Image: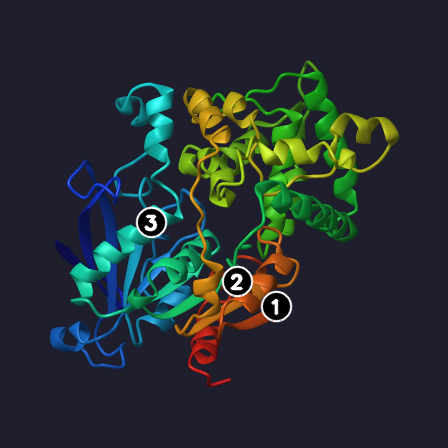
């Protein structure tokens, strides 16, 4: 272990060997990285000595995604400042992400064929992540239960945790991440496209000048092949996927600022500027989180048949998202939201080598169930969840249905924050959830 300091924090790096397949504990092992953070000086309630800090209970943070490592803080920022007042916090890089054993276009060929790569990646869903947590908890806490804070997909993991290992949980806090216990991937996307349409309408109502700008960019992309600085292709569908920004607190403003300087004059006529393309690439590239694309629809799969590119198939039932038709009819170009499509594995250099692997995962039908409704109905763990009104990424109706199905779960339904409320709202969001879980509100 390595221990070091930042302003207001003492940090310790942990590495945990765990089985790739927890049903084969003596088989292949991978490594999970976790960063422990405690308050230094007088920042914590329990005092400022090493012994004081060692007495603090643990809180493990599960990042959204899938496919993202835990956020890197510099000092007690955002919700972390509130958490370290009474917890030792473990920021866990879920398997395959961050500093844990990586899974990407560079490393996965070591597994062998696309079929072998796909088989390997079946062990990277919420069920395996929770088993990792349990193995790590027993090593860190001496068997004592801990608190889980799950953001977005981290909340999906926390719900699985409640279904399979509630004995390891002191409290569960969920922000924007209560999943449907039953919905198929098709049902998830049938609920999603109308939400995305509403976000487009709200964006164009705020920034009406963006309607013509987006149409002009789409028309240019339909007529020209545009390559991003990193070698990716900016197709009109890829451009539309910038709508994923519309689900964050300042996303509508980010999108507006991006669109306002798209074109520059050139000897060959108007062209998309290098500055615009550089920013677009930063938003669209999966290089830093390839598992988000490869496993995205698998997080909804529960033995109900293959996902089979659900977002792409369901999109066909919403013709208003077709760019060519919108341009021909004079309508607004609609941006899309949080969805992964087969063309991602053609346009993005970070995903192209994984195209066949992703196809095999999309056709896989034997995914295990992730949630146990009966066990959740008998839940005894204190649970509090922030549910964001008209959340772009996680259907609010699905979340509230699940909230009613988990015994004792208390919700805070709010339109004060968007899906990233735990980041934007920081201490206030965490404080409200802790108060709810402790029945102080």
Q: On the picture, is 418 further left or further right than 436?
A: right
Task: Give the spatial CA distance, label 1 vs label 2.
Answer: 8 Å
Residue at image point 19% right, 36% down:
28
Earlier sequence position, callout 2 versus callout 3:
3
- Quadrant in the picture for residue 37: bottom left
Q: Quadrant of residue 38?
A: bottom left
> As displayed, is residue 8 above or below residue 180?
below
Q: Nearer the viewer, residue 307 or 75?
A: 307
Q: Residue furthest toward the bottom? A: 440
Q: Is residue 221 above or below residue 294?
A: above
Tag 2 residue: 421
Foreground residue among 429 and 403: 403
Q: Which mark is residue 129?
A: 3
Furthest residue in direction front, as rendered: 374
Q: Nearer the viewer, mark 2 or mark 3?
A: 3
| Residue 71 position within the rendered picture, expressed as x and y whole percent measured from the top left | 37, 53
Q: Secondary structure at mark 1?
A: loop
Is residue 259 found left or right of 394 in the rendered image?
A: right
- In the rendered image, residue 376, in percent from the top left (x then y), is placed at 46, 65
Tell us which disc is closer to us: 3 or 1: 3
Say if mark 1 contacts mark 2, CB within 8 Å: yes
Crowding at mark 3 (Cα within 10 Å: few <14, some 14-19, many 20+): many
Residue under numbered circle 1: 416
Q: Is residue 209 above or below residue 408?
A: above
x, y percent for residue 306:
53, 33
């Amino acid at each position: 272990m390595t221990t070091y300091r930042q302003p207001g924090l003492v940090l310790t790096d942990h590495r945990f060997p765990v089985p790739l397949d927890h049903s084969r504990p003596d088989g292949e092992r991978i490594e999970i990285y976790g960063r422990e953070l405690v308050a230094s000086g007088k920042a914590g309630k329990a005092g400022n000595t090493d012994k004081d800090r060692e007495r603090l209970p643990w809180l493990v943070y599960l990042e959204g995604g899938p496919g993202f490592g835990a956020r890197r803080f510099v000092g007690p920022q955002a919700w972390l400042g509130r958490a370290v007042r009474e917890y030792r916090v473990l920021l866990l890089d879920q398997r395959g992400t961050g500093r844990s054993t990586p899974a990407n276009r560079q490393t996965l060929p070591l597994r062998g064929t696309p079929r072998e790569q796909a088989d390997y990646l079946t062990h990277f869903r919420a069920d395996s992540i929770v088993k990792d947590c349990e193995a790590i908890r027993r090593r860190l806490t001496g068997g004592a239960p801990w608190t889980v804070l799950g953001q977005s997909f981290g909340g999906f993991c926390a719900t699985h945790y409640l279904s399979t290992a509630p004995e390891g949980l002191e409290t569960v806090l969920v922000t924007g991440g209560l999943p449907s216990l039953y919905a198929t991937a098709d049902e998830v996307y049938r609920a999603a496209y109308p939400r995305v349409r509403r976000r487009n309408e709200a964006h164009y109502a705020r920034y009406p000048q963006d309607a013509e700008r987006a149409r002009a960019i789409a028309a240019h992309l339909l007529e020209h092949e545009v390559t991003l600085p990193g070698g990716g292709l900016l197709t009109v569908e890829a451009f539309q996927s910038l709508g994923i920004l519309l689900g964050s607190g300042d996303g509508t403003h980010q999108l507006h600022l991006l669109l306002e300087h798209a074109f520059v004059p050139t000897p060959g006529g108007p062209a998309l500027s290098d500055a615009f393309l550089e920013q677009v690439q930063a938003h669209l590239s999966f290089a830093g989180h390839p598992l988000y694309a490869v496993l995205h629809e698998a997080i909804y799969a529960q033995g109900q048949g293959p996902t089979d590119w659900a977002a792409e198939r369901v999109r066909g039932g919403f013709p208003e998202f077709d760019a060519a038709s919108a341009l021909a009819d004079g309508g607004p170009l609609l941006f899309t939201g949080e969805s992964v499509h087969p063309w991602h594995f053609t346009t993005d250099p970070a995903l192209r080598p994984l195209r066949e692997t992703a196809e095999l995962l999309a056709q896989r039908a034997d995914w295990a169930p992730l949630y146990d409704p009966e066990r959740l109905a008998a839940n005894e763990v204190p649970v509090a969840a922030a549910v964001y009104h008209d959340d772009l990424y996680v259907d609010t109706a699905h979340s509230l249905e699940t909230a009613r199905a988990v015994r004792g779960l208390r919700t805070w339904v709010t339109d004060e924050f968007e899906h990233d409320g735990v980041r934007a709202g920081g201490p206030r969001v965490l404080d409200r959830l802790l108060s709810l879980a402790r029945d102080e509100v």
